Image (cartoon, rainbow, N blue to C red):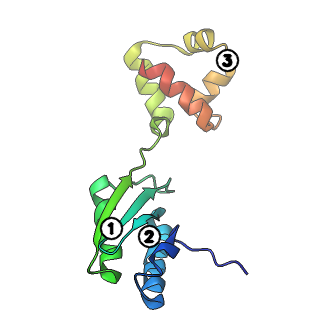
Amino acid sequence: MVNMSIIQHINLLKNHIGSKQLDKLEAGALRHKEQSNIEFSITAVDDTTIQVSTVQNETSSGKYASEATLLKRTQDLFRKQMPGYEIVVSAETKLPSPAQLVNVPWIENKMKEKGIRIKQIAFDTGIDRESIADWVTGKRAMSQIVKAMFYFYLIK
């Protein structure tokens, strides 16, 4: 069986802390992964400093931590097990796709605001009028691609 680590490159810490601390780091990282889809990767370690890259991937809730929150969570996690080390964090925040805003009320509002009709969208996009009407009225579910099309078409 292959032992998969939650923290990428955690083996870089083996000469700096004990197996009990490594297990506690992994357990804490697992909680962050399960609750907020946050992942940690050790990028460098020396006798006084540990460098960690932190990334929050897409979440089902659509809620994302700020850069400051990611920095704090990472420092808190590692400082508990490595109190004598400076924890240097590079955090990558996830920005949700603007197309996630798109739903029937959003489309209706933007069309009204811009004075655009279904016929015009069909003409400009080359998509048949019936499909556009079904999406705009909610009769047909929109894929991510369709939401992106409406977003970029109506945001201009």
Between 104 and 4, which is closer to the camera in this rendering? 4
On the image, numbered disc 1 is attached to which residue?
73
Q: Earlier in the sequence, mark 2 or mark 1?
A: 2
Q: Percent position (x, y) of residue 92? A: 40, 51
On the image, numbered disc 3 is attached to which residue?
127
Which image quarter is the C terminus in? Answer: top left
Judge whether 22 appears above or below 138 on screen.
below
Q: Amino acid at mark 3?
A: Ile
Q: Amino acid at mark 1?
A: Arg
Q: Mark 2 and 1 residues: CB-CB less than 8 Å, in contact?
A: yes
- SS of the residue at dot 3? loop
Q: Earlier in the sequence, mark 3 or mark 2?
A: 2
- SS of the residue at dot 1? helix
Rendered image quadrant of residue 63: bottom left
Rendered image quadrant of residue 77: bottom left
Q: CA distance from mark 3 to mark 1?
A: 46 Å
